[in-house]
Image (tube, grey):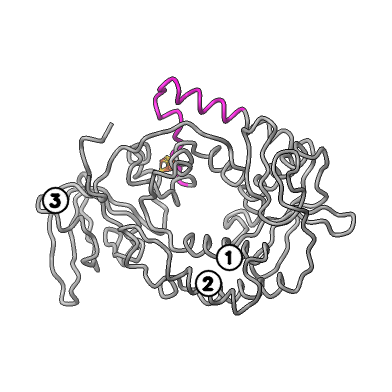
Amino acid sequence: MKPYFTRILPIKALQRIYPSRFFQLENCSLSELWNADKETEHMLPSPESKLGNLIHKLIDQVVRGTIKDLVGFENKFDEELEGIEYLWFEKHLIPLRRNIPDFEVKRQHCLNRVKEILNEKRVTSPVGEGKFRRRNGSNVWLESQDLLIGGYIDEINQFGPVLRIIDYKSGSVYDRDKNQLKAEYTTQLKLYAALYYDNFQTWPDELIIKQVDGNEIRVPFSQDECLALFQQAKNKFYYINQLISKNTDASKLATPSPANCKYCTYRPVCNFYHQNMEDISTEWAKVDLYGTLLEREALGNGKERILLQAKNKYYYIRGVSSRHPALNERSLTNIRIYNLSRDTKSNHFMENNTTTIYIDNPQVNR
Ligand code: SF4
């Protein structure tokens, strides 16, 4: 099937719980099950996360010593930036440096962090498996004794008597609305602390979020809450896999809500979102529309304006470029447009660089 048609994605059992993804798994299990399945592609662009993944990967190589100096880092950054793979709806984002507004600021922060790491001295225990698992170093793999929870920890280090678990973050670490640390990050670090205890019967002294500008933020924690989270994650693992093994209705796995769905890149294939879309996305800055394509008008600038009818409402969308393969289909009726910017009037919208169009495939609607 052509990739711009909506379709049903398979739902596969969880292999393990990753601390970095547990918060999302709690919020909407369906989205995390799709995300955990490497064969399931994302359905909407997210240029910031592409850059964030690259920065995270390269900083890790600096910490591990694979990249030894600043010149090496800059060369690798450019090389990897060139080599990023883009899905069909992302190709217009090349080059990424022109499509992320504060790209250079983020790169500079990253360079500052790399300089700092290169100046630090660190002690790393030898790499090992099984009972010789590493107790410190960078990119340390730890898994629970029962193998249900596991993940790579960015850095575990010992400064004198102080054992620190550090996680690097390239984007904002604060919750926009609540002005506090994002719960997904604090949850992740607390699970790392419990994982460490599960492996070595020792608790870390500090849990640290380190931003690319070098800023360190300490995450308060108690041993009891870390252990409770650890158990909660295991219970979730069994609960979800039991639902999947019994072929339970997927609605038990989905939790559609404005907060959960806003940045979910599986919105185009999620019927639970579509059933509630109007209620969920009303306040978002970027808007999703779903309806019948009534008219297409070519504009002087080579773009189009289209008229969409959704129920009894009419929507005008301007600045629609030719990059959407869906618009080349001969018989085009019901379409779904994601990530539109608001225009001057309430029923007017326009394309931006994350706007993506899918054709609604009625056979997959449940
Ligand atoms: S769109 Fe919403 S309900 Fe659907 S998978 Fe994503 S977060 Fe869950």
Mark 1 and mark 2 in contact (Cβ < 8 Å)?
yes
User: Closer to the camera, 294 or 195?
Assistant: 195
Quadrant assignment for the C terminus: top left
Residue that protrudes farthest toward the right in the picture = 161
In this figure, which residue is indicated by the disc labeled 1?
Answer: 58
Q: Is mark 3 within 8 Å of ligand 1?
A: no
In the image, which residues are magenta?
235-258
Could you tell me the amino acid type at mark 1? Leu
In this figure, which residue is indicated by the disc labeled 2?
Answer: 77
Secondary structure mostly seen in the magenta stretch: helix
Could you tell me the amino acid type at mark 3? Leu
User: Closer to the camera, 247 or 38?
Assistant: 38
Could you tell me the amino acid type at mark 2? Phe
Q: Is residue 265 left or right of residue 112?
A: left
Residue that protrudes farthest toward the left in the picture = 330
Q: Position of residue 90 (x, y in %)?
A: 35, 61
- Which label sits on residue 332? 3
Q: Is residue 294 left or right of residue 325?
A: left
Q: Quadrant of residue 151?
A: top right
Q: Position of residue 207 (x, y in %)?
A: 75, 52
Query: Which class describes the residues within 10 Å of circle 2: few (<14), some (14-19), or many (20+)?
Result: some
